[in-house]
Image (cartoon, coloured by chain):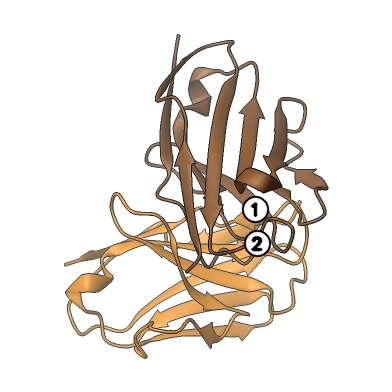
Amino acid sequence: QVQLKESGPVLVQASETLSLTCTVSGFSLTNYGVIWVRQPPGKGLEWMGIIWRNGNTDYNSALKSRLSINRDTSKSQVFLKMNSLQTDDTAIYYCTTPLMDAWGQGASVTVSS
Amino acid sequence: DIQMTQSPSSLSASLGDRVTITCRASQDIGNYLTWFQQKPGKSPRRMIYGATNLEDGVPSRFSGSRSGSDYSLTISSLESEDVADYHCLQSIQYPLTFGSGTKLEIK
């Protein structure tokens, strides 16, 4: 059974760096990629980026300068790091499979000024 | 980037009504269109992929269709459990882009 679970801080200060972890089970990161999606309060979904099964990455151009996605295949973990946070980065951050047929429960992150 | 224009932004309908939500793509996306349902406080759930293919376990009252660059999600007979936000997604080109979402409520 494919499962994903996000973890990380609930509150981050503006200008600091957000670090989130997506721990997966039921599949290997060497066989499937992982996508990050975020959703500001009361707003729609935004595709952030993907780490492919070969370790390559693609990013939303609007976030590319601040965003990096990495992984540790031995731990079945994918890491999101985004720097220079602003209050409008407050959102629920989700990790999901490339076909988006399985999602984590989301990590709610508030950026405080 | 491909723009997905979703309408309406909100919709109030009665139980048993036929409901349709539409997304229009700014470029050709073929059938690379997915519909998600998101209930309050929950993660999105994939409902329809490839524009018309129903995910396993999704009730048959849900259907997807395409007419040119317009993609529709239809609920043939609205039930109370269908109250949710609905999102479309194009996946033919990176960055993937979502529609702005539709909030569906019961009248």
Q: Residue furthest front?
A: A74
Q: Give the left or right position of residue A51, taking residue A42 as reference.
A: right
Q: Mark 2 and mark 1: span between their CA atoms? A: 6 Å
Q: Is residue A26 visible?
A: yes
Identify residue type, mark 2.
Answer: Pro
- Chain letter of the residue beneath label 2 in the structure image: A
Specify whether B26 is left or right of A15: right
- Of A77 and A85, nearer the camera is A77
Residue at image location 69% in from the left, 73% down from the top: B32
Q: Quadrant of residue B11?
A: bottom left
The residue at 56%/23% (across/down) is A18
Q: Between B51 and B103, which is closer to the camera in this rendering? A: B51
Question: Mark 2 and 1 residues: CB-CB less than 8 Å, in contact?
Answer: yes
Residue A47 shows in this picture: no
Tell how many labels: 2
Q: Which residue is mark 1?
A: A34
Q: Secondary structure at mark 1?
A: strand
Q: Which residue has dot 2 on it?
A: A98
Where does residue A47 sit, x and y in percent of width and height?
62, 48
Name the spot of residue B20 as percent of width and height, x first. 41, 77
Above or below, A38 against A33 in this view is above
Answer above or below: position of B11 versus B30.
Answer: above
> Is B78 situated left or right of A79 in this image?
left
Q: For the point 61% across and 49% down, which residue is it?
A: A76
Query: Going from the N terminus, do you reach mark 2 or mark 1 first?
Result: 1
Q: Which chain is brown?
A: A
Outermost residue toward the bottom in this view:
B60
From the image, state the color of chain B.
orange
Tell me if residue B24 comes above or below residue B66 in the rendering: above
Output the chain of dot 1. Answer: A
Residue type indicated by callout 1: Val
